Amino acid sequence: MLKDRRWVALALVLAVFAVPGHGAERPNIVLILLDDIGYSDLGAFGGEIDTPHLDALAYSGARFSNFHTASSCAPTRAMLLTGVSSHAAGIGSMRELMPLVHRGQPGYGGVLNDRVTTVASRLRSAGYRTAVAGKWHLGDQPRNLPPARGFDDSLIQADSGSDNFEMRPYLPMKPEAFWYDNGERLLSLPQDFYSSTAFTDRALGFLRDNAGRGAPFFLYLAYQANHTPLQSPAEFLERYRGRYHEGWAAVRGERIARLRALGFFDDAASFAEGPPQSEWDALAEPERYFEARRMQAYAAMATAMDHEVGRLLDYLRESGLYDDTVFVVLSDNGAVASEPYDNPLGARWLRSHYHRDVERLGEKGSWVAAGSRWGRVANTPLSGVKFSAGEGGVRVPLFIAGVPGQATGRILDQFTYVTDLAPTLLDLAGVAPAASGPQAPMTGANLAPLLRGITDRLHPPDEAIGYEFSGSAALYRGDYKLRRNLPPYGDGQWRLFRLATDPGETLDLAGAEPELFAALRERYDAWAREAGVLPMPEDYSLGRQVLLNAVLFFYLPRHAWHIALALAVLVAAFVMWRRARARRPAAGN
């Protein structure tokens, strides 16, 4: 009997040390998603922007130098929360950009479908308390809002983005901004509202409410920083006044030097070209001043967000929860380099709703974007931007800290993908993913063995991982990447790159390695058929489609009564005119 008890005791001891959390049964999990943050924006990834709290967290864990997402927000969020491809999750494209012939087709609902279960649902079923605060962009119907997707508490912005200070849309794609508090639509926001602060306040409220419950928590904190419009509280804007007057090339060169010094890339790595200094020097002084001011707003927004992360971390330390918490931080895609003011219709709407006063850029009521040059600098040293399949659009910062047994301060250069995070979180929580059933199976790999140094490679050299969004596409296999970008981000031709030595995608190997190129093309076609990727219409234009969808699906339904009344008045006027003309005496009578 005594011997049996010893074996039981030994089993219990082993069980305690086998589960995550250094004695805690299950770790708390904080998942922080940044919005449109470029590869080298954060200090821990070579950037000059002041992000001390995120940097400290990154250095305390592992940074990933070769991590990939989708090139746009909603597909990444779908894959992040479900562990399956964006097409399998129902978000093969975003409603704002989707061609009419794709709407409603399998994989193209534009919202999470019923074939997927979120990490939050799985964790809640396992006893976790769950919350989300931030941008959602996975649907705004009851079946797709957070309460139906596994979250006990939620404050979300449901659209692709919004103003950060006020209850209003940021572009003429929707007539209103849609915010929800635990599934109930909000009709107003407080006077002192700022999105990053509000999301952190809600997260802290959830944590305080969870105190004493004895349950681990899963907190998904999805900031709008640095999505357009670039906006920040004044105190952070003032920190950057006078900065960035050296120009694009100088800032980019300093980032590259820091990336190399940190160990992200060796001296042999080939980088994409950035905006040349000659372009900066050719600008008139007022133009250079405006460009510096817009980058100041970009940096200020990121620093304001970092400040809010610091508030969260302070609470976790003070409450004794920090050491039992796993942190996962990533960006949803690369930085954007488009400029809505270049579109006449977009510019007209923006001028009637926002100001662009250079001295007040980034303040409440202003609208500014990083633009085509600073957006590329944010993605240094990579090629491409948000919406493109270039590395600048899809390779983003990721760091993970707090995993028991992981080494600190490491930079991991193995290829990893956004679908790897869901199975990783479940494994750390001791939750097994569903092995079979009607749900789409997770396709990602568990990162925990890589974090703990048990393995040095997760994805086998012959494993092919496909990706597609609005016709731009990629296939990754080993060190190689097959890539196609449709206009305006490319010419629609397939190219082949060896990312291990050419992360900037500077040398097309399609001609030098024709057999490999052909084999990867076949692999992509097979993946696309299996994933249900639909071909893009030959005349597809992203900008034109956004405008058409805004008119058809957002403005016309909202103003249908006014349009019908106007048409009725016109028809009545036409009928009266015809009758009056018929009664008019003929000429000469």
Image (cartoon, rainbow, N blue to C red):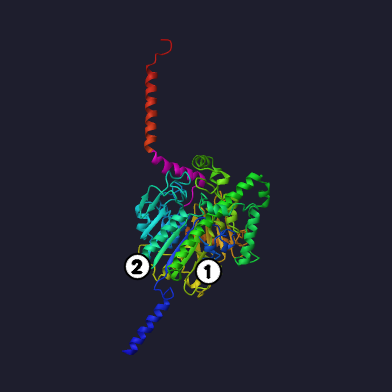
Indicate the position of residue 240 as horizontal and vertical percent values.
58, 54
Indicate the position of residue 396 as horizontal and vertical percent values.
53, 60
Residue labelled with disc 1: 62
Q: Chief secondary structure of the magenta span?
A: helix
Q: CA distance from mark 2 to mark 1?
A: 31 Å
Q: Nearer the viewer, residue 334 or 352?
A: 352
The image quadrant where one finds the C terminus is: top left
Q: Is residue 334 above or below residue 452?
A: above
Q: Earlier in the sequence, mark 2 or mark 1?
A: 1
Q: Secondary structure at mark 2?
A: loop
Residue labelled with disc 2: 213
Residue furthest left as drawn: 1
From which residue to which does the magenta span run? 531-559
Indicate the position of residue 102 as horizontal and vertical percent values.
43, 49
Is residue 551 highlighted in magenta?
yes
Indicate the position of residue 2 as horizontal and vertical percent values.
33, 89
